[in-house]
Image (tube, helix red, strand yellow):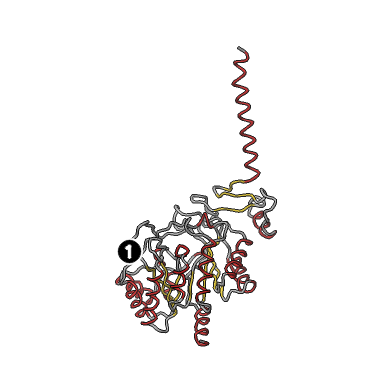
């Protein structure tokens, strides 16, 4: 009888001891800050730790030592300011102005889409009134589902509107702008990813507005380098494709069909297809990346021949998207701008909390750069 009574007690003690050992093992390799996963870099002796500066910043913020942060959907957002709102540097004026109103009405009447609206960009008024227009081709439904993007998704969107290139070119000619950004959703359902549709639109824009500067902000065309070449030689002035984030965070931030290396291959191919073509890319910050990872991404982009880089703060569109890990300060954005231009040799870096990939794309420096290049030709 005594043995029968003792057996359950012994089993329970063994179970508790085993759970304790597992918990200790896990704590040596990972931990959690809120619901942001924090992965230790001490697990492997061959792993290169982040620079000392990064560790000091993380420790000052109360983060565990030697950790890398990862964004998650539903994780707590960074602490707001004293007034319960985002930091003051995120506040912008409401969009208004004569040119803004005219473009808004034109887009509606011609049934054209703009990424400024679909992605809920806060800079729409500043860009449109400043002479930069952005049109989204190939419909408003994306075949991919990146966890940072607010554009709606559809595995089988409607076929492209064959009249859209002419309507877009006509609208651009009537707006009186001097710089246009043509962008689109991902269209993995199309054989060429929509490259031919883009190329046709570029040619029509140039026919109707010969002096117009045209930037195409495009997908990776599912890695189809022939599609990249089709667009690169179509007559556009800037070929843009966004790397979006650093290598480590790419699988968590972007759709599985996108990859860090595939994006670099596309940018490299655009420059190979037309050596004097200006190429451009963008990174979102505040997703848990380290300074060393940003430096590595800059180096990779320059190695791919990228000329222009934009850096901006990631802002969560809705609670269904990835939470912000940190609000990067304006001073840090300034440091990254100097690093990109002075250390890595980008021709131009736009860096700031409210900067977006198409943000003020026609601003003076880039416009001057392109005009100067054309005069030499």
The location of residue 280, given as percent across then percent down, is 52, 71
- 29 relative to 142 in the view: left or right: right
- Does residue 148 lie above or below 281 as drawn? above
Crowd class of label 1 (few under 14; some 14 to 19; many from 20; radius 10 Å) = few
The location of residue 40, given as percent across then percent down, is 64, 49
Whether residue 130 is visible: no
Location of the N terminus by quadrant is top right
Determine the residue positioned at 59% across, 21% down: 8
Determine the residue positioned at 48% across, 64% down: 223
Determine the residue positioned at 49% across, 49% down: 74
- Residue closest to the eye, 106 or 275: 275
- Does residue 82 lie above or below 233 as drawn? above
State the count of labels.
1
- Residue closest to the eye, 186 or 313: 186
The location of residue 136, given as percent across then percent down, is 39, 68
Q: Mark 1 = which residue? A: 159
């Amino acid at each position: 009888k005594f043995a029968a009574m003792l057996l359950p007690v012994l089993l329970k003690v063994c179970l508790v001891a085993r759970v304790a050992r597992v918990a200790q093992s896990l704590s040596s390799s990972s931990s959690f800050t809120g619901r942001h996963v924090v992965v230790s870099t001490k697990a492997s002796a061959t792993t290169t730790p982040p620079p000392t500066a990064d560790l000091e910043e993380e420790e000052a913020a109360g983060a565990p030592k030697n950790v890398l942060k990862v964004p998650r959907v539903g994780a707590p957002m960074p602490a707001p300011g004293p007034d319960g709102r985002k930091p003051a540097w995120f506040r912008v004026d409401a969009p208004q102005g004569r040119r803004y109103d005219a473009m808004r009405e034109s887009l509606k009447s011609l049934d054209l889409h703009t990424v400024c609206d679909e992605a809920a960009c806060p800079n729409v008024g500043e860009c449109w009134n400043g002479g930069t227009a952005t049109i989204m081709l190939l419909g408003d439904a994306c075949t991919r589902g990146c966890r940072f993007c607010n554009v709606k998704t559809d595995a089988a969107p409607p076929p492209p509107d064959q009249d859209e290139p002419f309507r877009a070119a006509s609208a651009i000619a009537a707006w009186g702008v001097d710089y246009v950004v043509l962008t689109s959703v991902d269209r993995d359902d199309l054989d060429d990813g929509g490259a031919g549709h883009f190329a046709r639109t570029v040619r029509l824009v140039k026919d109707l507005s010969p002096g117009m500067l045209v930037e195409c902000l495009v997908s990776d065309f599912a890695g189809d380098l022939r599609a990249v070449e089709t667009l690169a030689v179509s007559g556009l002035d800037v070929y843009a494709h966004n790397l979006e984030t650093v290598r480590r965070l790419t699988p968590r931030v972007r759709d599985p069909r996108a990859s860090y290396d595939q994006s670099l291959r596309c940018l490299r191919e655009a420059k190979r297809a037309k050596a004097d073509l200006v190429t451009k890319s963008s990174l979102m910050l505040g997703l848990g990346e380290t300074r060393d990872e940003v430096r590595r991404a800059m180096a990779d982009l320059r190695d791919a021949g990228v000329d222009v880089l934009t850096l901006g703060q990631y802002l969560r569109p809705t609670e269904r998207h990835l939470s912000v890990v940190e609000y990067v300060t304006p001073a840090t954005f300034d440091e990254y701008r100097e690093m990109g231009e002075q250390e890595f040799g980008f021709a131009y870096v736009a860096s700031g909390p409210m900067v977006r990939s198409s943000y003020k794309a026609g601003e003076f420096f880039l416009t001057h750069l392109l005009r100067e290049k054309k005069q030499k030709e």
